[in-house]
Image (spheres, helix red, strand yellow):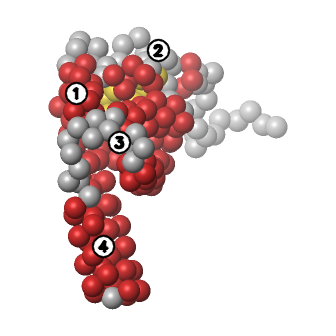
């Protein structure tokens, strides 16, 4: 094999990305995190509206207009439960948790797996990384410990759910900007200037 110089050959080095763990990373701002969550929520609600519209259209075609209107009325009336109702045994709450997480994974699963980002985080160039190593976090850990675990309060009374959400948000105002869901998954959200592979 010839050892001639090839100007088109990619440069070579012994350095790999796995060896690079920055001493300091720039944390995502609270504003970036909130904006990313708002973007994700808007996309989620659009997906829900589209799925409801498809469901009503199927109901309309299959059973007629009266049945579709009854289904729409049930959807609209489903959120009129008492404020202090315990939801632990309510199959509608369990079903809603499952459906919302399936929608969430359909929207964000690939980006979470590949880059540690939701669509909103990707647009704002921020990502979730392991708090200790600053490397990408496995999808099961992200999904279960950052998202699924935090829907358990939904199974209790609503005020407890909202108290948890507010405390979670307040934790993000600390110097290290790690929220409760960051602590359970051992993650932090950083600004991303290069692709996380």
Quick one: SS at disc 4? helix
Residues packed near mark 1 inside 10 Å, few (<14), some (14 to 19) or many (20 plus): few
Which residue appears at 39% of the width and 80% of the height?
58
- The residue indicated by pointer 4 is 71
**Residue found at the very far right of the displayed protein:** 1
Labels 4 and 3 touching (C-beta < 8 A): no
Label disc, if present, on residue 87 of the rendered structure: 3
- The residue indicated by pointer 2 is 132
- Would residue 32 be seen by someone viewing this image from the given angle? no
Foreground mark, 1 or 4, reads 4
Q: Would you identify the image quadrant in which residue 3 lies?
A: top right
- The residue indicated by pointer 1 is 163
Q: CA distance from mark 1 to mark 3?
A: 16 Å
Quick one: SS at disc 2? loop
Of the residues under marks 1 and 4, which one precedes in the sequence?
Answer: 4
Q: Would you identify the image quadrant in which residue 57 lies?
A: bottom left
Quick one: SS at disc 1? helix
Of the residues under marks 4 and 3, which one precedes in the sequence?
Answer: 4
Residues packed near mark 4 inside 10 Å, few (<14), some (14 to 19) or many (20 plus): some
């Amino acid at each position: 094999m010839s050892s001639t110089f090839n100007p088109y050959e990619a440069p070579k080095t012994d350095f790999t990305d796995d060896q690079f763990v920055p001493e300091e990373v720039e944390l995502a701002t609270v504003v970036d995190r909130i904006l990313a969550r708002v973007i994700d929520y808007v996309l989620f609600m659009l997906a829900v509206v589209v799925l409801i519209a498809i469901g009503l259209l199927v109901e309309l075609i299959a059973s007629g207009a009266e049945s579709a209107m009854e289904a729409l009325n049930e959807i609209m009336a489903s959120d009129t439960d008492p404020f202090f109702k315990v939801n632990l045994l309510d199959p509608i709450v369990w079903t809603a948790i499952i459906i919302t997480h399936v929608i969430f994974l359909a929207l964000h699963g690939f980006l979470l797996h590949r880059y540690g980002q939701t669509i909103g985080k990707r647009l704002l160039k921020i990502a979730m990384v392991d708090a200790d190593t600053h490397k990408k976090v496995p999808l099961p850990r992200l999904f279960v410990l950052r998202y699924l675990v935090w829907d358990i309060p939904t199974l209790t009374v609503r005020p407890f759910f909202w108290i948890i959400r507010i405390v979670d948000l307040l934790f993000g105002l600390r110097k290290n900007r790690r929220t409760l869901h960051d602590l359970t998954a051992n993650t932090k959200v950083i600004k991303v200037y290069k692709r996380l592979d």
